Amino acid sequence: MTLYTNRPSQPPGDPAGAIEILKNGGVVAMPTDTVYCLAAGLSHTGAISRIFDIKGRVTTKALPVLVADVIQMRQVAEMNPLAEVLVRRFMPGGLTLILPKKPVVPDVVTGGKPSVAVRIPGHTLALYIIKAVGEPLTGTSANISGSGSVCEASGVADQLGERVDAILDGGRCPGGVESTILDLTRPEPVIVREGAIPRVELESYYFK
């Protein structure tokens, strides 16, 4: 495991090493606006499978996907009008949408389900890495399944240690709360997990 430092309080570090690992099919823990996540390129199914082993997560439980912008989001998911509105209002930020997936998303990511959970993180370093890698990344929390999510690189190292190829230390995550997950694949929107975006803010967009 390699530790790369890119803390806002220090001179800008160079995340090139972490980017190269991701391009070559590795697994990197990196900060987002909510919590630290385990990232792997969407085209590297072997790395994605490793994430389930690293976390001790059952393979039927889908992994969320991080994208750099709405263009990438449309590449991985079918966007309905409500999704377009919510993306414009809440992203980049702490909202994850569950949408019908497109064929580019491998089944290992979604646990064989026809939907994908996707969001645009509101974090400059995370967005830079997604763009530099050139494809969407997995964005599941960097922790052992069943344990608490972590907001600092030291917490990732404590839980996961040498299981990951690199930890990109970008300082403490500003949010500290996992994203709210909204399922738009059902007849009516359903909040699967309430997190960074309050329920009342979302419901005002679809419950009139």
Image (spheres, rainbow, N blue to C red):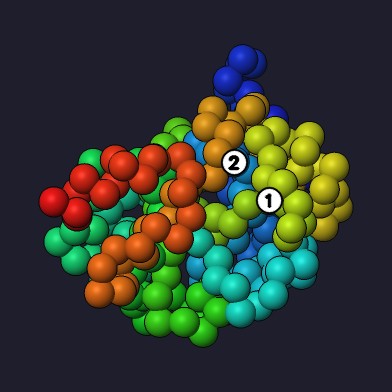
Residue for point 78% across, 34% down: 154
Residue type for callout 2: Val
Q: Is residue 201 above or below residue 207?
A: above
Residue for point 19% across, 54% down: 207
Whole-percent x and y of residue 38?
64, 54
Name the mark on residue 178: none
Q: Which residue is mark 2?
A: 35
Q: Is residue 78 above or below residue 121?
A: below
Q: Are marks 1 and 2 in contact (CB under 8 Å)?
A: yes
Asked whether, in this view, residue 199 is left or right of residue 78, the answer is right
Camera-nearest residue between 110 and 82: 82
Q: Is residue 143 above or below residue 103?
A: above
Asked whether, in this view, residue 84 is left or right of residue 149, the answer is left
At numbered mark 2, what does the secondary structure look like: helix, strand or loop?
loop
Residue 60, quarter of the rendered image: bottom right
Q: Counting other residues with Cα less than 10 Å from the Cα at mark 1, is it few (<14), some (14-19), or many (20 or more)?
A: many
At numbered mark 1, what does the secondary structure look like: helix, strand or loop?
loop
Asked whether, in this view, residue 179 is left or right of residue 13, the answer is left
Mark 1 or mark 2: whose residue is earlier in sequence: 2
Residue for point 32% across, 60% down: 73
Whole-percent x and y of residue 206?
19, 55
Residue for point 50% across, 61% down: 64
Q: CA distance from mark 1 to mark 2?
A: 8 Å
Residue type for callout 1: Ala
Q: Is residue 112 above or below residue 101?
A: below
Q: Which residue is mark 1?
A: 142
Q: Is residue 95 visible?
A: yes
Q: Is residue 41 visible?
A: no
